[in-house]
Image (cartoon, grey):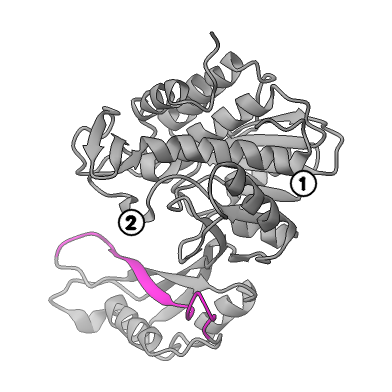
Amino acid sequence: MTVSALSEEFLIPLLQKFVRYPSEQTDLQEDDPKVQSFVKECVASELRKLDIPEPSFDEKGNLFVEVGNISSDETLMFVTYAMTHPAASMTNPFAGEIVETPEGPAIRGRGVAEQKTSLVAALAALGEAAKYDLDGRLIFATLCAGETGRHDALESVLKQVSSQPDKAIICIGTDGKVAFRNKGRIDINVLVEGKSTHSSMPWNGIDAIDGARECLNALSEIKLPTPAHEYLGPPTLTATGIRSGPDATHTLQSEVAITFDRRLLPGENVDAAFSHICENIPAAGPWSVKCERGPIMYPNEIKIDGPLMGSLNAAFRRAGYEEANCVDCDFALDAGYFGHLGSEAVMLGAGEINQFHSDNESVLTKDLVSMSKIYFYLIQEILNSEKAT
């Protein structure tokens, strides 16, 4: 008897297998061999077992496959992720053990609340949907990203597919709720340059740390020009990193680099947000200051009564829910890139947001099963396939 891809018998062992294959973020980011290998050895091999057409890989190692009516203008894309947060201080992060919780059995392991459960659910939904005739086009992608905070991997895949999708699901843990709007982010790097000298003779140099202090003080008091969003609240500016050099003892520092995280609201102009920060950095002083743009992730917001939300509500009802619950997110992923291109996208997946990067990351097995069904029914709702019950 063939086991349904939407059943516990299929889903639980597959998630355990994926957890037991570490794909942690390292300094190599998407180029890490273990992340690349996870995509090829785990994801691609499971797609082949489901009789899905042979997947393709772009130059960055990202996987993608297109099924259904490839020439259709009606397209749905599932974007999944391979890279997880490092194991850090989590014990037995790759055991994939089943633990009992007050809400029922759960699978514990690094990445289950964030990336890997939604990846498995989407893969299973793809396998089940492929049994039916799809009038539209379904794209499934597994990116080597997941923790990098850039749109580079998605941008690379979209250059390879036959045409841009008009609807997309970013498969990431959202407590099983639809994140139809979220903040974006631009990283801003401020570089203060002075002149190094022996710290016993500071008058012979220019202290970059003094300049960095001036920048931090000025930006801590800055008033961001964008008014607060009704639901997402105000934009924010946060210093997230600082380093100085030369890295030597008894030396006046000639360089300090500070990274700022500027959260963006839907509708904000990225160039204007960056320029505003640069204009408010103090230029006076013996040191020099440079302001550089870092990685960007666009904010996102779709209409609550639009086509994608209508299909999502229908999919949730077919999966046994009254309708889709929604959630607003301060964090950003790839939904905003689709919005930037003019397509509808949301974040949706099994896994609790407050467990991201935690030492006891787990996901309820029932949530894994439910999300696979929601994904499957969404495919049928949007791509007008022969509907299963």
The residue that label 2 is drawn on is 354
Residue plotted at (60% across, 55% down): 346
Which image quarter holds the C terminus? top right
Residue plotted at (26% across, 34% down): 93
Q: Is residue 164 left or right of residue 155?
A: right
Residue 182 image point, x, y percent: 53, 65
**Nearer to us: label 2 or label 1:** 2
Residue type at mark 2?
Answer: Asn
The answer to which of marks 2 and 1 sits earlier in the sequence is 1
Q: Is residue 244 magenta?
A: yes
| Circles 2, 1 touching at the beta carbon (< 8 Å) | no
Q: Is residue 234 magenta?
A: yes
Label placed on residue 164: 1
- Which stretch is magenta? 228-249
Residue type at mark 1?
Answer: Gln
In the image, residue 336 sits, relative to residue 383, either above or below, namely: below
